[in-house]
Image (tube, rainbow, N blue to C red):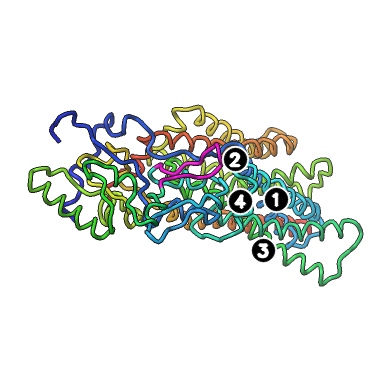
Amino acid sequence: MNDTAPPSIRPADERDVTYYGLPSVKPSLWGGLVSGYIFVAGVGGSVQIIASAADLIGDRALAPIVRNGRYIALGATVLGGPLLILDLHTPQRWYNMLRIFRKTSPMSIGTWVLISFGTLSAALAPAQFASDHGHSPSRAMQTAIKLLGVPAALAGMAMSTYTGALLSATSTPLWAAAPRRIAALFGASAMASGAATLTIAEQGHGALDTARPLDRITLVASALELFLLFSLRLRFREQGVDGALNETGWGLAYDFGAMALGAGTPMLHHIERVVGPERAPRRALTVSLAVLAGGFLLRHVLLRAGNTSATRPKDYFRLTGRVPQ
Amino acid sequence: MPPFQSNWLMMSDVCKHCSPAPCLEACPTGALFRTEFDTVVVQQDICNGCGYCVPACPFGVVDVSLEDGKAHKCTLCYDRLKGGLEPACAKSCPTDSIQFGEIGELHDRAQRRVGALHAKGAKDAYLYGAPGTPGATGGLQQLNAFFLLTAAPETYNLPRTPSRPAERVAPSLISGLATVAGLALASLALFSVRRGARE
């Protein structure tokens, strides 16, 4: 169909390239409930992963991590479901989500991930409760619980990251520009937030046995998160969609909230502890709260800046303006 | 195109009834479905207003009404089609600029029209959304409502190479899961190092 090719594949003058500046796509209707859910799902999913890893190692000293993890994961499910239902515009029909499974829809994938994760978490938490209250399980039962932790951790991995696909499988310029990096970033940030949550849960009990590995998980995950935050920023620039961050306040929130506060604080604290003139105190609570605040901000900024990017037709046309090969 | 009269460009802002349709592929309830006429329609009695079809649409067509909490879009007059009538837009268009028919037949007719326009010297006429043309890109096989345009697609508020959002699901999921799986293994290692150090 060569004779039907458009006359000038070169875009017209930048000033003329839009239809009177009107948006070409519509922004999502999502706001704080959804960024809140993305955060809670990430924390719950990753806490379950860390708890299952600690359980698999089978070290008695790590028991508090397993215990707190099982409870927090269930708590996150109990909180997450209602957040999603409240965001529906016809919430009384939430159960219509259960009519189908659709592999092209991260919203549908996520429904079933949340249900699987919730079911597994709801099985593990009472088992934990029983053993916490003196009903020590039989050896076979213990093995069964440990094995159940594996699918729970796998579902936790999906909980921590599917929300990246939820954003990217849209026509919103900012989200569609970086499907791989957003999901990886959500995963790294979720693991850092999960370890930080478990650290907070252990505050006051402060056993060094559990504090050390949790601090290190936070550090490794935050280092990866920081790298991905930089990488995502570059990707947005390459794709010509960074205006939704740079020309609004969201860019500052990304740089100072997600990057410096969320991912930078654990690095700084680690450097302070290693190269400080004398061994600096462990500021576990401060660092953990900074990680959690940064983790929530990251999701909220990406969500709201994405909505802004959908109202910027030039961003969308730059992203969809490449000459097809 | 040299100025002729006002030189206005007229455009029907219709749902493109994409094949495959990103809104339908995003819908988690099955409310959006493909009809026997190969059009895409929202079933109002099933939609729960999750709104995921809204950012999914590459053309900004579907929206959620805050009055009734359901998604709404052009149905290509599903009720009229069922009754053997053509859609109201095609029926009422006094210049026959909007035409309705079998999609293959429309493709042929449009192709001939582009040829005739080229022969008359209107060299900038082209199709948008027919198979193999701009608009039918990035996993979108064709738009069942397609256009004959005479200026850059962006002039009509159309993206040059839209893409099918569902193609980003697998890369995104794989990348996310691989990252977290790596960090889960790192956690296992960090827990066992700690154990090793104590023993």
Residues beneath discs 2 and 3 located on the same chain = yes
Work out whether A264 lies above or below B170.
above
Furthest residue toward left: B120
* Side of B162 where A139 appears, left or right: right
Which numbered circle lies on residue A222?
none
Q: Which residue is mark 2?
A: A35
* Residue B93 at x, y percent in the picture: 26, 42
Please tell me whether mark 3 or mark 1 is closer to you in this view.
1
Please tell me whether mark 2 or mark 3 is closer to you in this view.
2
Which element is circle 4 on?
Answer: helix
Residues beneath discs 4 and 2 located on the same chain = yes
For the N terminus of chain B, the image quarter is top left
* Side of A172 where B70 appears, left or right: right
Chain label for disc 2: A
Query: Disc 3 versus disc 4: distance between alpha carbons?
Result: 14 Å
Q: Which residue is mark 3?
A: A151
Q: Nearer the viewer, residue B110 or A265?
A: B110
Image quadrant where residue B37 sits: bottom left
Q: Amino acid at mark 3?
A: Pro
Q: Nearer the viewer, residue A30 or A184?
A: A30
x 32%, y 38%: residue: B157
Q: Which residues are magenta?
A: B60-74
* Residue A75 at x, y percent in the picture: 74, 48
Q: Which residue is mark 1?
A: A77
Q: Amino acid at mark 4?
A: Ser
* Residue A164 at x, y percent in the picture: 53, 48
Chain label for disc 4: A
Query: Disc 4 versus disc 2: distance between alpha carbons?
Result: 13 Å
Q: Earlier in the sequence, mark 2 or mark 3?
A: 2
In the rendered image, residue B115 lying in the magenta stretch gets the answer: no
Callout 3 touching callout 1 (CB < 8 Å) = no
Q: Amino acid at mark 2?
A: Ser
